[in-house]
Every structure is written in structure tokens, then in C-alpha cells.
């Protein structure tokens, strides 16, 4: 890449990153302003209570089922000898 091309790339990438930072900051400020004017929805309350409840059922079997589809031979090499 020529020095001129590198300078153009550096300027363009800096502009893009600055635009992302400005948009991110604006969205945070806008979200904070809307919190006062709009209460949380019922769905938000349900999800929050489910995530913070210690007695909520675990869904680790779903993670294991998803991994089983992607890698059906996981753990079947015989190289690991674990005693529990």
C-alpha cells in the first residue's frame, strides 16, 4: 500500500470509529432519557425476575442438546479418564 493510500485508510477508519463512538454515546444518553418517561414492560419484568431468581430451573440441558447437534462425537475419544 502506498503512503498516500495508507493515510487515506487511516483517516477513513478514524472517521468510522468516531461515528460509532458518537452513535454509541448518543444511544446511551437517549436510552437514559427514555427511562424516566417510559416504565419497563411486563416482559422485561418477567425476564429480570427469571434471571435473578436463584430457584429458577436451569436450562443447561438445552445447551448440551445444542452442542450435541453440532458435535455429536464430543467426549467419545476415550482420552479423558475422569473419576467423580
Image (cartoon, rainbow, N blue to C red):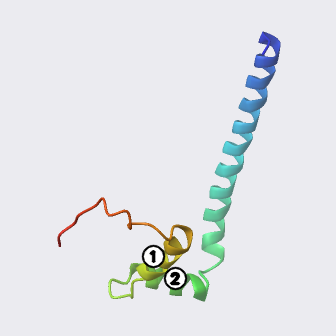
Dot 2 crowding, Cα within 10 Å, few <14, some 14–19, many 20+? few
Give the secondary structure at mark 1: helix
Residue toward you, 5 or 38: 5
Residue 35 point in image, percent of width and height: 61, 71
Residue 2 point in image, percent of width and height: 80, 12
The residue located at (59%, 80%) in the rendering is 40
The residue located at (65%, 75%) in the rendering is 37
Dot 1 crowding, Cα within 10 Å, few <14, some 14–19, many 20+? few
Relative placement, left or right, of 65 versus 52 is right
Residue 77 point in image, percent of width and height: 37, 62
Residue 70 point in image, percent of width and height: 56, 68
Relative placement, left or right, of 58 versus 13 is left
Residue underneath mark 1: 64
Quadrant where the N terminus sits is: top right
- How far apart, in angstroms, are the residues tagged by discs 1 and 2? 22 Å
Residue underneath mark 2: 47
Quarter of the image where one finds residue 14: top right
Quadrant where the C terminus sits is: bottom left
The residue located at (38%, 87%) in the rendering is 56
Relative placement, left or right, of 53 versus 10 is left
Give the secondary structure at mark 2: helix
Residue toward you, 38 or 51: 51
Amino acid at each position: 500500500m502506498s503512503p498516500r493510500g495508507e493515510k487515506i485508510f487511516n483517516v477513513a477508519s478514524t472517521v468510522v470509529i468516531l461515528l460509532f463512538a458518537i452513535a454509541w454515546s448518543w444511544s446511551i444518553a437517549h436510552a437514559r432519557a427514555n427511562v424516566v418517561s417510559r416504565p419497563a414492560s411486563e416482559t422485561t419484568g418477567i425476564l429480570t425476575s427469571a434471571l435473578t431468581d436463584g430457584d429458577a430451573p436451569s436450562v443447561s440441558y438445552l445447551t448440551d442438546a445444542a452442542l450435541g447437534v453440532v458435535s455429536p462425537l464430543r467426549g467419545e475419544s476415550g482420552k479423558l479418564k475422569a473419576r467423580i
